[in-house]
Structure formats: structure tokens, C-alpha cells
Image (cartoon, rainbow, N blue to C red):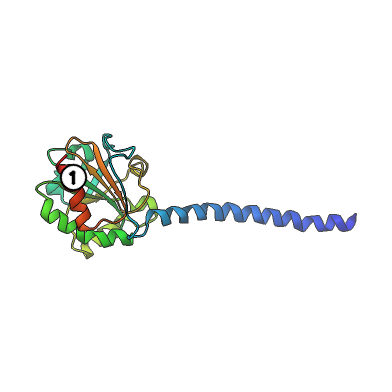
């Protein structure tokens, strides 16, 4: 009996250690999983068309603090709804430490140069909510790539859920009436970006 009692003590200690390890590793695994999903492969883009549950809904409003492009959007701090009309909006969610976001930025810049009179491109940095960089990282990426289209960040983490951001980058096409027309998850190239914008303009 004494031997059994002695043997049971290490078992209790071992169980306690296991519980402590689980309390540490389970949240860590969740964080890593979210980061992996958030910054998906640039070659794994997928389209959610008009059949999307969010398509046709009014785009949720939120506040954007601009890194640049204040002259285009009308101020340092603007709301999405203040930008609605007369042109449709191409809303691009990105992050400073997201490789696919970096890869698509030159195409977004070319698109803006060609379509700025017909559509408003706005990049919104949400890296701080996904573990993909700070606002400083976002500003540095814009400067490094010589990006000039309007871009900023938001302090409202709810945009991730409101816009169902399941991968990074994510681009939302918003009609001139403020309703979601289409959504693209993953990096866009120039031809697809133009195609989807023309579909929105011609609706």
C-alpha cells in the first residue's frame, strides 16, 4: 500500500504538468492556425461571386485612418460610407507582413493608375488584428514599393468578421450604391482585377 501511495504522487504531478502544457499550447496552436489561414498562398485565390451570402448587402461601415491619399478621400480620418458614390469602391484588406499582399500591390498600383477616374481603390491595413504586422510595417511596405493609391488602417477589429475575411489579402468590390457586388479572397492579378471591376461598372 505504501508503494502504491508513493507511485501515485508522480502521476498527479505529471497530470498537472500536462494541464499546464495544454493551457499554453492550445492557444498557441489557435494563433498559428489563424495566422496561416490569414496569409494564404498567393496562388490559391478563390472567387466568391454574386451567389455569396454577403453579395447584395450594404457594405458595413467603419473608420479608416489614412496613411496616404487624404486628398483623394477627403481627409485624414474617413468612414467607408462617406466614400460611397459616385464611383464604385475596390476595398482591399492587406497587411504589412503578408507576402501575397506585397505580391499584388504593384498590380493594384497599375490598376489605380488606369481606373482612378472610374473606381476608387482603397487599401486598408488589418495586419495588427491578424499578427501580420503593425501600422509601422504597413507604412514601410507602402514606401518600399512606391505605392501611391489611397491606403490606411483601421482600429476596428470587427471588420474581419463583418467582411468575412478568411484569407489575406481580401478584396471587396462595392457598387456605387454602397452594396457588396463581389469578393475575392487571395492575391489578385491585374487582369482579374480589371475584369471584376468592369463587371461591377457594367451592371
Count numbered badges in the picture: 1
In the rendered structure, the answer to whether residue 78 lies left or right of residue 165 reads: left
Task: Identify the residue under disc 1.
Answer: 199
Location of the C terminus by quadrant is top left
Q: Give x and y (percent) for residue 164.
A: 36, 43
Q: Can you tell which quarter of the image residue 180 is in?
A: top left
Q: Give x and y (percent) for residue 97.
A: 33, 60
In front of the other: 200 or 62: 200
In front of the other: 4 or 118: 118
Is residue 67 shown to the viewer in this render? no
Other-residue count near label 1 (Cα within 10 Å), few / some / many at <14 / 14–19 / ≥20: few
Location of the N terminus by quadrant is bottom right
Question: For numbered disc 1, what is the local secondary structure?
Answer: helix
In front of the other: 134 or 102: 102
Q: Residue furthest bottom?
A: 144
Q: Give x and y (percent) for residue 194.
A: 18, 52
In the rendered structure, the answer to whether residue 183 lies left or right of residue 2 reads: left
Amino acid at each position: 500500500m505504501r508503494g502504491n501511495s508513493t507511485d501515485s504522487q508522480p502521476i498527479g504531478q505529471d497530470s498537472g504538468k500536462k494541464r499546464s502544457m495544454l493551457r499554453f499550447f492550445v492557444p498557441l496552436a489557435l494563433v498559428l492556425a489563424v495566422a496561416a489561414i490569414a496569409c494564404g498562398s498567393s496562388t490559391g485565390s478563390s472567387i466568391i461571386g454574386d451567389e455569396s451570402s454577403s453579395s447584395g448587402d450594404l457594405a458595413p461601415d467603419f473608420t479608416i485612418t489614412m496613411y496616404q491619399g487624404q486628398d483623394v478621400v477627403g481627409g485624414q480620418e474617413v468612414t467607408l460610407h462617406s466614400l460611397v458614390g459616385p464611383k464604385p469602391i475596390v476595398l482591399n484588406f492587406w497587411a504589412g507582413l503578408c507576402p501575397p499582399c506585397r505580391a499584388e500591390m504593384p498590380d493594384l498600383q497599375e490598376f489605380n493608375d488606369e481606373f482612378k477616374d472610374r473606381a476608387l481603390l482603397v487599401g486598408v491595413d488589418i495586419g495588427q488584428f491578424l499578427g501580420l504586422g503593425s501600422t509601422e510595417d504597413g507604412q514601410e511596405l507602402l514606401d518600399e514599393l512606391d505605392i501611391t493609391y489611397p491606403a490606411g488602417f483601421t482600429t476596428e477589429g470587427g471588420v474581419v468578421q463583418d467582411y468575412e475575411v478568411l484569407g489575406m489579402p481580401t478584396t471587396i468590390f462595392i457598387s456605387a450604391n454602397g452594396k457588396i457586388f463581389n469578393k475575392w479572397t487571395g492575391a489578385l492579378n491585374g487582369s482579374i482585377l480589371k475584369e471584376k471591376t468592369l463587371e461591377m461598372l457594367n451592371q
